[in-house]
Image (tube, grey):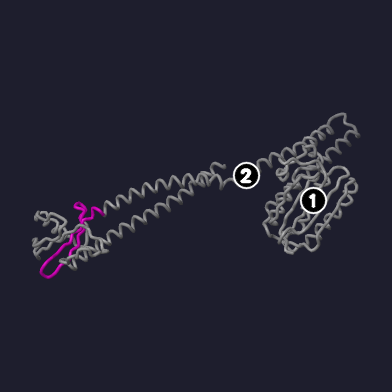
Amino acid sequence: MIRKLRLKFVLINMSVVTILLGAVFGLIFYFTSANLERESIHMMQDIAAQPFRLEAPGVADDSVRLPFFTLQMDPAGDLLDTGGGYYDLSDREFLGGLARAALASPQKLGVLKEYDLRYYRFDTPQVRSVVFADISSERATLDGLFKTSLVLGGVSFLGFLWASILLSKWAVRPVEQAWKEQRQFVAAASHELKTPLTVIMTSAQLMAGPGCDGHKQAEFLDGILVMSAQMKKLIEQMLELARADSAEPGLAFAPVDWSSLVSRTALPFESVFFEKGLNLQVEVEEGICLWGEAAQLGQVVEILLDNAQKYASPGGQVRVELCRQGRGRCLLTVANQGPPISPEDLPRLFQRFYRADPARSRSGSFGLGLSIARSILARHKGRIWARSEDGFNRFLVELPCTS
């Protein structure tokens, strides 16, 4: 699929490039041809208006001067006189043929292609005159321009093709990454669901088998209920992650007292930390407000606190700190004492279904909480990252604040 997407990108891009290159070089050729023809005609009209004008030596003339000659005929079409110093005008039979060809045309201005001559005919009551101008240089210029355009167009096409191939890799990289993550997500979700389903099916088969007494049935039923609850929790987290990913940024946002929300969310966890022998310290700077969705922001705090109580060392400390961070930003830090997290694992903690400690996989942790938190914060134009130093594992959340 990714290869087809890249190919489609390149084809569309090169189609547009081909049209643009054709239009640009076509316009250049057209305007150059029109300009050369206009200058040639202007010169011939000047000669027709002043056939015997003499140029002074050393006087600059901005007009184009092409090789030309003039023929004068009587009303009957017989050649009377010739003028111009660019050509051998001794072959009067040939000149007469040129004159007759020009006079036979219904148009005053035209081109004799076989001779590379452009003519301009003007008549007086006594004399019919024709000015001929050589257009071989004009045609050579246009031919050279056409060949140059082909070369430049071909080189430009190849250059744009190379750039399009590179750009296609860059453009589809997010799609490729999303496709890769989707496949990993499906594989990980299938793996997480496979074990509880296997336990449920095995327990159900044993319960239905012969010789299963009431005590065994109760044990198997407890196992089924435990695995069913685990599957339910996993599915709820997957749905929550899907909702966080698909929600539109800014939807249902309202002013939120972030300081009050953090304090209220941390309060119910005090008993949980006390029962586990952990010391919870909360330091919240008052008056920090932001624009967002209170329920989802509270869920971020819950995820971080739940993560801290799961991975904190026995008897360790858990610190929650909220303060302003520069102008228009605030920083929430949830830190717990515990085994240090390796630098390789720190950026991977926010990947879906990733657990730095695989032994936690059966303790109700599916590795989705931090992914949900990251998706929620992305909606709020915030970010989350982790550090492990001085015996503490810290999770930091930065958000834009309004006060």
- Residue placed furthest toward the top: 211
Q: Residue 65 placed where, x, y %?
A: 23, 60
Picture quarter containing residue 345? Answer: top right
Q: Residue 398 placed where, x, y %?
A: 73, 55
Measure the alpha-carbon separation of dots 2 and 1. 30 Å
144 relative position to 171: left or right: left
Picture quarter containing residue 297? Answer: bottom right
Could you tell me which residue is drawn at 14 percent across and 69 percent down?
124
389 relative position to 161: left or right: right
Q: Nearer the viewer, residue 251 or 167?
A: 167
Q: Which mark is residue 177?
A: 2
Q: Nearer the viewer, residue 249 or 191?
A: 249
Mark count: 2
Could you tell me which residue is drawn at 67 percent across and 40 percent down?
184
192 relative position to 176: left or right: right
Q: Nearer the viewer, mark 2 or mark 1?
A: 1
Amino acid type assigned to the residue bearing label 1 in the image: Val
Callout 2 environment at 10 Å: few (<14), some (14 to 19), or many (20+)? few
- Residue placed furthest toward the bottom: 125
Location of the C terminus by quadrant is bottom right
Q: Which residue is mark 1?
A: 334
Say if residue 296 shows up in the picture. Answer: no
Amino acid type assigned to the residue bearing label 2 in the image: Gln
Dot 2: what SS? Answer: helix
Within the magenta stretch, is there residue 333?
Answer: no
* Mark 2 or mark 1, earlier in chain: 2
Callout 1 environment at 10 Å: few (<14), some (14 to 19), or many (20+)? many
Q: Cβ–Cβ below 8 Å for labels 2 and 1?
A: no
Q: Residue 347 placed where, x, y %?
A: 70, 44
Segment colored magenta:
112-137
Against 329, residue 341 (above or below) is above
